[in-house]
């Protein structure tokens, strides 16, 4: 029997083979959510561009604050007309407006009174008080975001703040998804007959691929037949940057993926020491990378997140690490130590003692409800027992999908 392969070893092999894409596209910033920056972005301007007011109030010279000051200007946000503040004067100013030359502080309006255009200030005034200095967010010439960054909403805003309207990103990878199995029927097509089931992996995988910002090429259902399998694989490899299949990688008579990939390219078949998700194939069809996921719906999800996702991210040019682990308190016990690393599907509850992880009752690899129920995967290393209340490692699904 083939020995089990630890996930870390499988990942090392998978990642070692990645050739990151070199294809670059320019994209409108508004469309760039989830895309991967292909170049460092430098700031051509400082943010903010001017010293500006953090308050509605009065701009003045702090050294003159305890004298009566004549209010001679009104500077709303966006005003470009402000003139130098001469000694003995102050300016009415509003949040975000540029501080006029000569002024060095802003007093909030609640601490000011104005009578006949003469300002009296209560309380002490420090230099630079309520002034947001030019460049406090971003200095001109500094690197705003680095190549390899997956753009998040706040990153899009940050790039806009330095005047960036278009961004160079790596062209999103095209990932072909094929679902193997004679038992599969497309939802919407027809009523199920005995022995059939609806193809759920196609949808899970399409969602997972898209959540990576990549394009999913839907290869549909591939029957359990050597020729059909070979043809579907070859076609997918022609059009896509990576081919992913579900099912058909066990070594039963009806599992044709292994033999056909071997015919068209090269393949390693592993028994991963994880649960769910034991069988996993990795190789290439021609020069197109190939990942063969198991068929069981929960296994598909877990192996995609743990193996295919890091592979695809690396191939897409992402430089940031993945798979941040958090900790939670076990809301369950594991009494029998397992031989494989378990990824239990758990939901999370905030409690005064911290996050508490609740295990879905049925952890069978065929039970997709367990994944739909869960907020995280709880990592239980091989040979480990867990008592209720123990601190355990979790992988948040929000960080994986
Ligand atoms: P296999 O590895 O092909 O033997 O598949 C293992 C199990 O996963 C079988 O019970 C299949 O019916 C199930 N399965 C395979 N592909 C899918 C799919 N696309 N959607 C739902 N279940 C599937
Ligand atoms: Mg099958």
Image: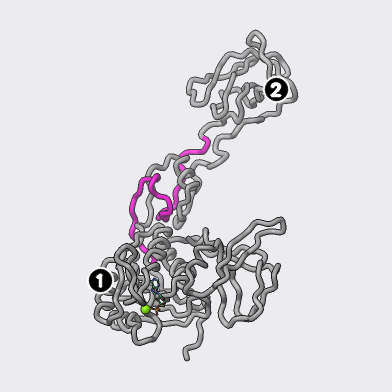
The image shows residue 118, relative to residue 95, as above or below, that is above
Query: Where's residue 382, x and y in %?
Result: 60, 79
Determine if residue 265 is in view: no
Instruction: State how far apart marks 1 and 2 are (Cα).
Output: 73 Å
Mark 1 or mark 2: whose residue is earlier in sequence: 2
List the single residue furthest toward the right.
123
Query: Where's residue 347, x and y in %?
Result: 58, 62
Tell me whether the residue at label 1 lies in contact with that at label 2, contact meaning CB atoms closer than 8 angstroms: no
Q: Give the residue number, with chain letter if any, for mark 1.
A: 235
Main SS, magenta region, reads loop
Q: Which picture quadrant has residue 293?
A: bottom left
Badge 1 local density, few (<14 within 10 Å), some, or many (20+)? some
Which structural element holds mark 2?
helix
The image shows residue 102, relative to residue 376, as above or below, that is above
Figure coloring: one colour
The quarter of the picture showing ligand 2: bottom left
Q: Give the residue number, with chain letter if any, for mark 2.
A: 111
Determine if residue 354 is in view: yes
Query: Where's residue 397, x and y in %?
Result: 52, 62
Span shown in magenta: 20-48
Mark 2 Cβ inside 8 Å of ligand 1: no
Badge 2 local density, few (<14 within 10 Å), some, or many (20+)? few
Residue, x 70% and y 28% (percent of image)?
126
Residue, x 55% and y 68% (percent of image)?
345
Q: Mark number for residue 100? A: none
Residue, x 30% and y 68% (percent of image)?
220
List the single residue furthest toward the top.
116
Q: Magenta span has 91?
A: no
List the single residue furthest toward the bottom.
1
- Answer with left or right where residue 99 lies relative to residue 150: right
Which structural element holds mark 1?
helix
């Amino acid at each position: 029997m083939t020995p089990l392969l630890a996930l870390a070893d499988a990942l090392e092999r998978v990642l070692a083979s990645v050739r990151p894409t070199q294809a670059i596209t320019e994209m409108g910033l508004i469309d760039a959510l989830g895309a991967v920056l292909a170049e460092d972005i430098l700031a051509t301007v400082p943010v903010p561009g001017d010293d500006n007011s953090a308050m509605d109030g009065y701009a003045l010279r702090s050294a003159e604050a305890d004298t009566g000051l004549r209010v001679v200007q009104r500077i709303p946000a966006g005003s470009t007309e402000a003139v130098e503040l001469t000694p003995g004067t102050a300016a009415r100013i509003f949040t975000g407006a540029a501080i006029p030359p000569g002024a060095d502080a802003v007093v909030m309006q609640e601490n000011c009174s104005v009578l006949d255009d003469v300002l009296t200030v209560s309380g002490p005034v420090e230099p630079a008080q309520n002034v947001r200095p030019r460049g406090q967010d971003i200095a001109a010439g500094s690197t705003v975001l680095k190549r390899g960054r997956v753009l998040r909403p706040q990153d899009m805003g940050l790039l806009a703040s330095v005047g960036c309207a278009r961004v160079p990103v790596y062209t999103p990878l095209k990932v072909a998804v094929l679902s193997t199995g004679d038992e599969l029927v497309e939802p919407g097509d027809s009523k199920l007959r005995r022995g059939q089931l609806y193809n759920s992996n196609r949808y899970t995988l399409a969602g997972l691929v898209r959540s990576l910002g990549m394009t999913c090429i839907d290869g549909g259902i591939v029957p359990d037949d050597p020729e059909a399998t070979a043809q579907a694989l070859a076609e997918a490899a022609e059009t896509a940057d990576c081919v992913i299949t579900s099912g058909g990688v066990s070594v039963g008579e009806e599992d044709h993926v292994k033999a056909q990939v071997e015919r068209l390219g090269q393949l390693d078949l592993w028994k991963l020491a994880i649960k769910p998700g034991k069988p996993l194939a990795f190789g290439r069809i021609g020069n197109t990378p190939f990942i063969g996921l198991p068929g069981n719906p929960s296994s598909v999800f877990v192996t995609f997140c743990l193996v295919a996702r890091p592979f695809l991210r690396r191939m897409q040019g992402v430089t940031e690490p993945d798979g941040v682990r958090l900790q939670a308190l076990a809301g369950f016990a594991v009494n029998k130590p397992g031989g494989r690393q378990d990824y239990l599907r758990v939901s999370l509850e905030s409690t005064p003692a911290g996050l508490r992880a609740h295990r879905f009752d049925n952890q069978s690899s065929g039970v997709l409800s367990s994944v739909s129920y869960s907020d995280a995967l709880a990592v239980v290393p091989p040979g480990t027992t867990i008592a209720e209340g123990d601190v355990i490692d979790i992988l948040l699904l929000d960080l994986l999908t």
